[in-house]
Structure formats: structure tokens, C-alpha cells
Image (cartoon, coloured by chain):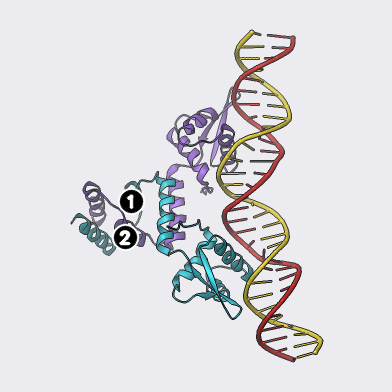
Chain colours: A cyan, B purple, C red, D yellow
Amino acid sequence: MKSVPHISDAEWEVMKVLWARAKTPCTANEVIEALEHQTDWKPKTVRTLLNRLAQKQAISYSQENRVYAYFPLVSEDECVRYETESFLKRIYGGAFKPMLVNFLKEEKLSPEEIKELKSILDDKTK
Amino acid sequence: MKSVPHISDAEWEVMKVLWARAKTPCTANEVIEALEHQTDWKPKTVRTLLNRLAQKQAISYSQENRVYAYFPLVSEDECVRYETESFLKRIYGGAFKPMLVNFLKEEKLSPEEIKELKSILDDKTK
DNA sequence: GCAATTGTACTACATATGTAATCCAAAATA
DNA sequence: TATTTTGGATTACATATGTAGTACAATTGC
């Protein structure tokens, strides 16, 4: 039962790239390129993030002809759950429903979205 | 338009104490005592947190006969909103609905809770 | 009035994080 | 083959954060 490491904001961006192509590991350069559009990080910055993620065992790599191909060791799902729980605990004292209520009151949802959420709720009553 | 400062995990605990008694500012000792039950921080630790919060203008204090009485400068609501948005942006790319869907599928909600959520959704369609 | 206490002001120090730059060896190129 | 380029390893450095400790001045108890 592996526990998910804490992934920082900047690291999370890198993970998103790797998760998006979990089937085919990415080279550092591919990650760097993927992030060029969303961030203005220098290549060295991305490499540092990759190294840190490898250190904390969030990712690993295989060596293909002297270039590393990185891939995630933890699933997006696990990490999302973990971060969400931390968030809930911190901000809402761990209570799920108050958060939902708060969100629902705040957020502008389209009629379709509301319908979708209601149908999910319907399913849960069965 | 004051922007909310970033409040760290440990600082958040302190803020919760102050928010709980927004009407009556707390002395450092009161905060320390309130936190004794939830944490095992030494008094000095809490004082450091109070100082940092004051530095980042999340709180301020008035001096009552050489003892400081601390009070929040930012509302819990503001901060919750801010942290929630950061969280959403980081984890769900800013999209509110996917998160909700995810949560609703995961969480075990009681029939009453489901009913309450549905009624909130109903209100929104009007 | 002098000593002990206490509240505040600084100082400390390791780890995390954002954001890279430098060094070095292997590969590609001229 | 000598040189430039490039990818990885190591180092850098400021700010944030967790978690206090020390110094000092005013207050309070003898």
C-alpha cells in the first residue's frame, strides 16, 4: 500500500503531462515542450521538477539510449483523492457536505450541469 | 480590493480560532489555549504563527494594557473562496463540475444529505 | 525594592519550493 | 579528430513553512 507523496504546485503541472500520456513515457524534452505553452519555465526548471518527483518516488524513468523516459508511479486518481482530502480537512474540517453546499451556492452552473448532478444524486438513492 | 494572503496549513489553524471569535479579539494566550487541544504546538510556535499572520496582514492586533489582542483582517469566507479556487485550479484545472462529479461518485452521503443537495440544486433551476 | 514571571521581539534552523545555473561526459557535427 | 551541442548530475539561492529557543523589558509577588 504505497502512500502518495506530497506533490507541490509546480510539480503537479509536470505530473499532469505525464499522466496525460501514461502509456508512453515521456523524455524530459517532451515534458519541457509540453509545458512551454502553459508556463514560462526554463528547461532546467522542468528538469529539476522531474528530479524532485523522481526522488519522492512519484515518478520513475527507464533509460532509452542514454535519454530518460519518465512515467508516473502514482495514479492521478490517487493523487487527486489525497489532495482533495487534505484540502477538505484543512479548509472545511474534513466535512464533505458543507463544502458541497458552499460550492453549489456559489457556483454558476448551467441547467445541463445541474441536471447531470441531479441524476448522479438520483443514482445514489437507489 | 484587498487580496487575501496565502495562509499556510499551520497558520490556518490559528485563523480558525480567530474567526471563531471575530467579535472579541483574542490574546495570544487564548489562542494558544484554544489550540492545545487540537495540536501539540509549543506556545512559542503559536506566537510565531501569529506574528507571521500579522506580517502578511491576515490579522492585526490592538494593544490592551501591554497584551496584544489579535483579530482577523480577512474574512473566513474570502479565504475559503481563495483557497478553494487555488485548489480547483491546481487539481481540476479550474473546472468545478468535474470535481463535483468525482466527489459525488466517491462519497457516501446519507439520504438526508442527498435530499438537501437536491433541493439546493432545485433552487438553482428557478 | 528585588526576584520571579510573563508577554513580546528577535533569532534559529531544517526542509520544501520556485526557479534556475554550472559542470561534465557522451553524441553529433564539422 | 577537434569542437560544439546536449542531456543528466550537481549546485545555488531566496522565500516559505514547521517548529521552536533566547533575550529583554515590564509586571507581579515577596
Give the residue at x 57% y 66%: A50
CA gap between label 1 and label 2 equals 11 Å
Mark 2 highlights which residue?
B101
Which chain does the numbered disc 1 sit on?
Answer: A
On-image quarter of the C terminus of chain B = bottom left
Which chain does the numbered disc 2 sit on?
Answer: B
SS type, badge 1 = helix
Does residue C29 appear left or right of residue A101 in this picture? right
Amino acid carrying label 2: it is: Val
Mark 1 highlights which residue?
A100
Q: Is residue A41 visible?
A: no
* Residue at the extreme left: A126
Q: Position of residue A92 (x, y in %)?
A: 39, 45
> C19 above or below A22?
above
Give the residue at x 50% y 57%: A5
Amino acid carrying label 1: it is: Leu
User: Are the numbered discs 1 and 2 placed on the same chain, yes or no?
Assistant: no
Q: For residue D12, what is the image quadrant?
A: bottom right
Q: For residue A116, what is the image quadrant?
A: bottom left
Q: For residue D30, what is the image quadrant?
A: top right
Q: In this orientation, which residue lies closer to the viewer: D20 or C6?
A: D20
SS type, badge 2 = helix
> A108 above or below B19?
below
Does residue A106 appear left or right of residue B44 in this picture? left
Does residue A61 appear left or right of residue B118 in this picture? right
Give the residue at x 44% y 32%: B21
Q: Position of residue C6 (x, y in %)?
A: 59, 22
Q: Position of residue B14 (x, y in %)?
A: 50, 38
